[in-house]
Image (cartoon, helix red, strand yellow):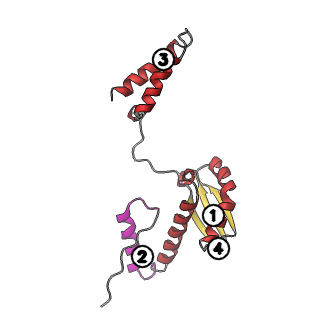
Amino acid sequence: MQSPKPPYHIYGTKVRRTSIEATDFLRRNHRLASLLPAATRMASLQKDVRLILPPMYANCETLSIQEGVLTLAVPSSAVAAKLKQQAPKLQAALQKKGWQVDSVRIKIQVGRAMPVQDDIMKPSSLELPPTAVQAFEELGDALPASPQNAELIAAIRRLAEKRKNR
């Protein structure tokens, strides 16, 4: 009797349980089972891309690789412009890992590549480390006391006092 295959986790998915359920479904359905190797390959490529690129490109997603053309989705034109500078390095590193990448194509997809935020942080919920609070206190003391700086100094001192009491 053959032992069951271990569950697969698709890299890049946030919820491991959901990922495993999806791969199990693909494996059980005969028509969709052929998609599992392609999904695993794309997940592996996405993982390699994330390892090669600096952390500032964490929102970039691998869309496809066809005929040697790697297509990446980015959340903005600013990220696309910066990523174009990294493309030769990315291409060379992927080729070293065994991927056949002849060129990199970048697509701007604002909604798709933005991270999902369950709860939006409110400014009042931000925490400052003690060194930052101390730096604000020092800044409040270092600014020259003048009518133009009075409101700024008061605001800096309030901020430092509020964060210090937390």
Report the residue at 52% width, 75% height from top. 38
Distance from the alpha carbon under mark 4 to that under mark 3: 59 Å
Distance from the alpha carbon under mark 2 to that under mark 1: 24 Å
Classify residue 41 as left or right of residue 76.
left
Residue found farthest to the bottom: 1
Instruction: Give, as a three-letter code, the residue at label 1.
Output: Thr
Q: Quadrant of residue 27?
A: bottom left
Comparing marks 4 and 3, which lies closer to the viewer? Answer: 3
Given residues 79 and 75, the one toward you in this image is 79
Q: Earlier in the sequence, mark 2 or mark 4?
A: 2
Q: Position of residue 64 (x, y in %)?
A: 59, 67
Distance from the alpha carbon under mark 2 to that under mark 4: 26 Å
> Mark 4 falls on what kind of element?
loop
Q: Residues within 10 Å of mark 3 (few under 14, many from 20)?
A: few
Q: Main secondary structure of the magenta part?
A: helix
Q: Earlier in the sequence, mark 4 or mark 1?
A: 1
Name the mark on residue 71: 1
Q: Which residues are magenta?
A: 12-32
Q: Was residue 4 drawn as part of the magenta stretch in this picture?
A: no
Q: Position of residue 131 (x, y in %)?
A: 43, 32
Above/below status of 92 relative to 120: below
Distance from the alpha carbon under mark 1 to that under mark 3: 53 Å
